[in-house]
Image (tube, rainbow, N blue to C red):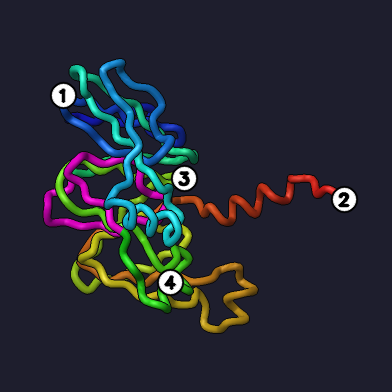
Amino acid sequence: MKSEILYPGAFPMVRVELAEGEHIKAESGAMVACSPTIDIESKMEGGFLGALSRKFLTGEKFFFQTLRASRGAGEVLLAPTVPGEIIVMELDGVSEYMVQKDGFLAGAAGVVIDSQMQSMSRGLLGGEGFFILKMSGKGMLALNSFGAIHKIELKPGQEYIVDNSHLVAWSTTTTYNIEKATSGWVASFTSGEGFVCRFRGPGVVYIQSRNPGSFGAWVRQFIPVSQ
């Protein structure tokens, strides 16, 4: 299996080349085009209960697409719904990542996708809900963002503060706490900043340059209100 990011920047695609018999799983609706040797199936990752938990607890779609090179080698073109970057990494069977609900694009057959429960305080304040996605296993993993992706590498003990709405993914070797962005509740409300994550290394954090919620609020002001 080989992968290549096409048209890097705001409107990229990822091309995945599959040998006969290989397959990948992708976010539902991510497939743009493929070779005629590729079969497309809908599959509930983790079985019915796993799919159900992702749907109702993380907001993820019930089904993933499985794209299989059943009748010979071929390629698949994949793209996310929103404008932004794509990154591709290789999971080594040891490293694990937590991914916000809209960050997963595609993964190799050996990538395990699970729902991870957060604590009550993180679920209420973090903006990602009580469940987020956990990626483990081995193979290619493609993530996408809203806007550009920025990688932050933290040394042991090093801290970094990230606005919750700008999170894409983070390695499970990091620890984090959720805090108010400013010192007081009134200040947090009036400043427009809500809650932030204070990460502590070692590990890696991926952030996105745009805030989906803020963008949605900006768009809404131009939508006529029916009387």
**Left or right of residue 193: residue 133:** left
Q: Earlier in the sequence, mark 3 or mark 1?
A: 1
Q: Is residue 204 above or below residue 87?
A: below
Q: Amino acid at mark 2?
A: Gln
3D distance between C-alphas at marks 3 and 2 = 34 Å
The residue beneath circle 1 is 19
The residue beneath circle 4 is 123
**Left or right of residue 177: residue 11:** right
Q: Residue at x 41, y 68 (%)?
A: 130
Q: Earlier in the sequence, mark 4 or mark 2?
A: 4
Q: Secondary structure at mark 3?
A: loop
> Start and end of the magenta stretch?
91-114
Q: Amino acid at mark 4?
A: Gly
Would residue 132 be counted in the magenta stretch? no
Residue 15 falls in image quadrant: top left
Q: Amino acid at mark 1?
A: Ala
Q: Secondary structure at mark 1?
A: loop
Query: Residue 63, percent across and down?
Result: 38, 44
- Asked if residue 206 shows in the view, the reply is no
Q: Is residue 227 above or below residue 182?
A: above
3D distance between C-alphas at marks 4 and 1 = 41 Å
Closer to viewer: mark 3 or mark 2: 2
Q: Residue at x 69, y 50 (%)?
A: 220
The residue beneath circle 3 is 147
Q: Secondary structure at mark 2?
A: loop
The circle on residue 87 is: none
